[in-house]
Amino acid sequence: MSEIDIQYDEINDALKRIGVEQDAAEVHGALCGLFCTVNGLDAPFWLDNTLTNTPEEEAYTVDALNSESRSLLTQLFTATEKQLSGNEFEFELFIPDDNSGLFARIEALSNWCQGFLFGLTQGGLTDPEGLPGELPEIVKDIVEISRAESYELDDETQDEKDFMELVEFVRVAVQLFVDEMQQFQVEEPNDDSGYH
């Protein structure tokens, strides 16, 4: 991400340490979905919901790891908020960089889109068809991209190009979502289900 010096693997490791099953891409996607639908979303609310699936018997271990993990996740939250609220169109999906294999990046993009759809739902979006403008079609497209991990890879150069086009589509779509959804945003949902 452009705003902070934080690595994808750092967030993945932080999530694993505290017992969150989703990867960094899916958690970031869910966060972005919430930013699109919830007015005044703050880091403590998001963290409390993200971390709710930790088993009770692991609570003491989690307390020992919580500080570092929460700090990294708060950095992710802050950077994402800054990107989505800025006017420079600098928002980036939090997925592995180009040094990772294409299949791993496709899988992460799929997970990111699944997380985004979950975040929209958790934020109160129940009827995508009722959204303004192009947003219903964008939701359908993101649903399709969320299934991308099942695609077969044939031509490495073309597959790489296609992947980059999908990432750019989702990146722009999220920014459009943020702009269009401001009038529909709700206050933080009173939902104890967490992001799982």
Image (cartoon, grey):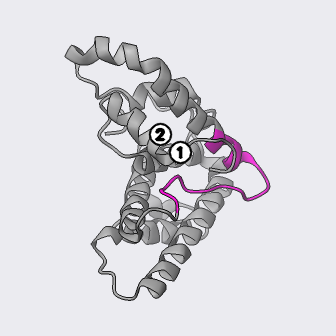
Task: Indicate the amino acid at tag 1.
Answer: Gln
Asked if the residue at tag 2 contacts the one at tag 1, i.e. Cβ–Cβ closer than 8 Å, the answer is yes
Q: Is residue 66 above or below residue 162?
A: above
Query: How far from the left and from the top, in percent, is residue 3?
Result: 69, 45
Q: In this view, does 22 lie above or below 106?
A: above
Tell me which residue sits at (31%, 39%) in the image.
196
Task: Indicate the amino acid at tag 2.
Answer: Glu
The residue under label 2 is 10
Could you say whether the residue bearing mark 2 is in a helix, strand or loop?
A: helix
Viewer-closest of 107 and 156: 156
**Residue 118 in magenta stretch:** no
Instruction: Check disc 2: other Cα within 10 Å, few if <14, some if 14-19, many if 20+.
Output: some
Query: How far from the left and from the top, in percent, is residue 80?
Result: 62, 44
Residue 7's disc is 1
Outermost residue, left direction? 57
Query: How far from the left and from the top, in percent, is residue 35?
Result: 57, 44
Magenta residues, start to end: 79-97
Image check: 138 left or right of 92? left
Outermost residue, front direction? 99
Image check: 132 left or right of 163? right
Number of numbered labels in the structure image = 2
Could you say whether the residue bearing mark 1 is in a helix, strand or loop?
A: loop
